Image: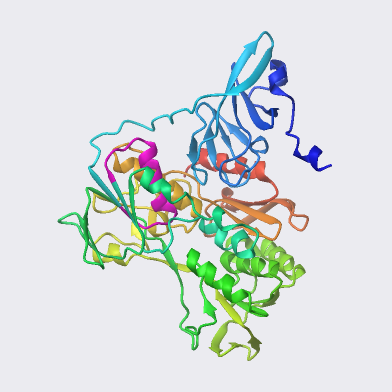
Amino acid sequence: MANDQAKPSGPDLTKGLPFSDLADGGMIVGHVGKDEVLVVRQGDNVFAVDAHCTHYHGPLGDGLVVGETVRCPWHHACFDLRTGEALRAPAVSPLSCWNVERKGASVIIRTRKEKSEPRPRGKITSPPDKIVIIGGGAAGFAAAEMLRRQKFEGSITLLSNDEAPPVDRPNLSKDYLAGTAPEEWVPLRETTYYKDNNIDLRLRADVVEIDRKQRQVLLRSGDRVAYNKLLLATGAEPIRLPLPGFDAPIVHTLRSLDDCRQIIAAARDSRRVVVIGASFIGLEVAAALRQREIETHVAAPEKRPMERVLGPEMGDFIRKLHEEHGVQFHLDDPVVAIEAKQIKLQSGAVLEADLVIAGVGVKPRVELAEKAGLAIDRGVKVDAYLQTSDPNIYAAGDIARWPDPHSGADIRVEHWVVAERQGQTAALNMIGIKEKFDQVPFFWSQHYDVPINYVGHAEGWDEIAVEGDIGAKDCLLRFKKDGRTLAAASIYRDVDSLAAEVELEMAQA
């Protein structure tokens, strides 16, 4: 039976596939030996690429074809069908392409193509000699990777104040924390990648000042690093509550790999944990620790989990889902003090805990930008090209507030995929390839076996249109204002989520 499950899907493509079986714009998953291959027809053209996303191995055959691209159903990565290039994060590695033979009325696929070069995004004009990136998170890594992918030959210095090379941060509150993902899945690239691609990655590098006049950044070590173009990708840091006892050893926040390792180590000897905050990060942590069979309590000031982002019905569903897995909620009852192993709530209730995780949100790290005199507006203010008020400095990720063409407002978004995609766009603009950042924001959250995908950006709405059944884990919610869809959230409606993303792309404000 195990052998049957291991067999690849679909027809044997080496024996031929009738061209008539391929609908225009349609796709079929077949196999060449043990390799699954996605075959896509666009007009008279037939493309063949690997059938699984290079991010988390999502099944591309369950995704959506848009022009000469295919989008992953899980986390909305996008690939070029001609070259296999990963056009949009979270995937950064390309798919393999396969040779397509046409014989009479049949399509035959037998061999992989030689590795294709990515198509240039534009002409590099007046490339700088030195690019410095401050921040080793999603935006910083994606920018460095894109620069080398586009054949930028100047120096790249990536300054990170982290202990570890860039990691897949979403995994830290999901599978890695739950103990179901090995540590080798966590780095975004092997450590040799940076040397092999001539990226000067400096860890534990604290930048204390940007000298705009001299175009240098000053490190706490006293070193100075010169730049022609600079990318600020300093990200965000967890909010620390001004509560008595918040600095106690049992209290942890989660942002870095080191934070996660400390929580895992503490969890091994913990019988009961209290999570402060019913946000995405707080409840993902709660789900992960329940998978470690630790008694888990969630205390928060809100009446419903995630209601501010997902609305009341989805909030009630998420609470019920967690309660079914043993999480105990103490909502509308904020923590007021932590004394030894006692967590005191506003109601007077006291929770015993061996471990406390604070997941009450993050704040953008804008101190460097402020000190440098850059324009600030609840974040670092940038234009459509992610350029700050200094033409030699760009900003991307959690700190950047940009003009969003879809909502018609200046927004700042704290999503991993947005940060990666902004890093990629900033990289192109720093080397003279003019590209506006006009992508629709996307994030995903995982709670046990339930994924929640969200596209768009809705800070407020006057209607939530529900398609399907939230309780049955089969739904798409559209968040609308004045009849116009601003965002959509879904559970197990992956193609609908991708289609909603395309609709939002087409309907700019």
Please, is residue 505 above or below residue 80 in the view? Answer: below
| Residue at 54% over, 58% down | 170
Q: State the image coordinates of residue 175 (x, y, percent, origin top left).
A: 62, 59
| Residue at 65% over, 59% down | 180
On the question of residue 436 being in view, the answer is no
Q: Decide which of 125, 151 is in the foreground and name it.
A: 151
Q: How many marks?
A: 0
Q: State the image coordinates of residue 207 (x, y, percent, origin top left).
A: 29, 64
Q: State the image coordinates of residue 455 (x, y, percent, origin top left).
A: 56, 49
In the rendered structure, the answer to whether residue 142 lies left or right of residue 303 reads left
Please, is residue 184 above or below residue 57 in the view? Answer: below
The segment highlighted magenta reads: 133-155
Please, is residue 472 above or below residue 290 in the view? Answer: above
Farthest residue, direction right: 1
Is residue 134 in the magenta section? yes
Please, is residue 371 above or below residue 66 in the view? Answer: below
